[in-house]
Image: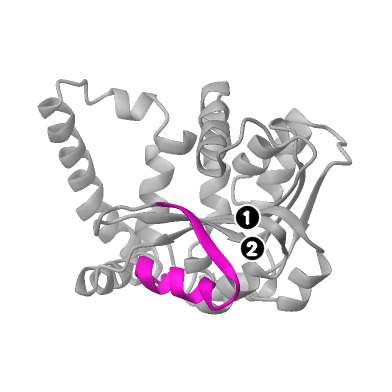
Amino acid sequence: MTTGANEEILRGERFAFGRNWSRFLSVLTETRIRDAELSLRSMLEVDNLFGKSFLDVGSGSGLFSLAARRLGAAVTSFDYDPQSVGCTRVLRQRYFPDDPLWQIEEGSALDADYLRSKGQFDTVYSWGVLHHTGDMWRGLANAAIPVAPGGQLFIAIYNDQGAISMGWRKVKRLYCSGVLGRMIVCGLFIPYFVAGGAIGDLLRGRSPLRRYLEPTARGMSVFVDWFDWLGGLPFEVATPEAVVQFYRNRGLHLRKFVSVDGRLGNNEFVFVRQ
C-alpha cells in the first residue's frame, strides 16, 4: 500500500477498501460476472463493447474491468489502493492471463496530470468511487478529462440525504477509529442489517437466506457491501441536480439516470461528451 494511503488508514481517515475487496474474490462466480456485464450493457445501452476503449477509475475488486473486457473492450484499470490493484491483477491473471488489451496501474483520480496521460476513452467508468477520494468534486472533474468526443462517462455517487448523511459519516469515522470502533459499529449495525433484511424478505414471501447465497445487484456480495458501507471513508455525497449541473458546465450532458429516489444509496449517471 502506498505510504499516503497507509497513513490515512492508520489515522482513521480511510477505509481499507482493497482488503475488503480481496474477500470478494473468494465468492466471485460466473453468475456474478454475468450480472456485472448486464449492468454495463443496460446502463450503456449496448450489446457489447468490441472495438471500444474502457477506463475503470478506481477498479476496486476488478469485477467491472473484467466485465468490460469480456464484453470486448480494451481496458485500462487503475486504483489508489495497491491492494485493489492487486485484486484486479488477480482477475486478469485468472481470466485473461498476459492480455495486452487489459492494462492495470496504480494511480489517483485526484491526479489530473495522470488522467491526461491516459489519453481518451470511449467509456470512462467510476461506480461508487469518487465520493471516497477525499475531494469528490475534484475527482468528478478529473474523471471527465479522458472522455473522448462522443464518449460516455458512467458514474455512481452517494445520494445527499442531509442530516442522515452526516450521521452516517460519524458512523464511518467511528468504524475507522480502531478495533474498538469497528466492534461497536459492527455490533450495532450488522444485527440491524440482518433483521431488516429478513423482515423485508419475509414480507415479500422470499427466504431470508437467499440474500446471502445469491449475488446482489451488479453481481456484488451483501457481506462485502455491508463493510464497505459501514467503514467507507472518505465519504461525501451530492444531490443529482448538483452532479448534472456540474457536468453540464463541463460540456457533458446527461444521457441516462437511475435514481434512488431520495433514499440511501448511489444515484447512477451516464453522461456523453458531444
How busy is the neighbourhood of tag 2: few (under 14 within 10 Å), some, or many (20 plus)?
many
Q: Which residues are magenta?
A: 235-257
Is residue 261 on the magenta stretch?
no
Residue under label 2: 273
**Residue type at mark 1?**
Gln
Instruction: Please say if 39 is above or below 180.
Output: above
x then y, percent, for residue 186 = 28, 53
Give the quadrant of the N terminus: bottom right
**Residue type at mark 2?**
Arg
Name the residue rendered at 35%, 66% in the picture. Answer: 172
Is residue 256 on the magenta stretch?
yes
Marking on residue 152: 1
Q: In the picture, residue 244 is in which quadrant?
A: bottom left
Instruction: Compare marks 2 and 1 and give the one earlier in the sequence.
Output: 1
Marking on residue 35: none
Name the residue rendered at 15%, 26% in the picture. Answer: 204
Secondary structure, mark 2, is: strand
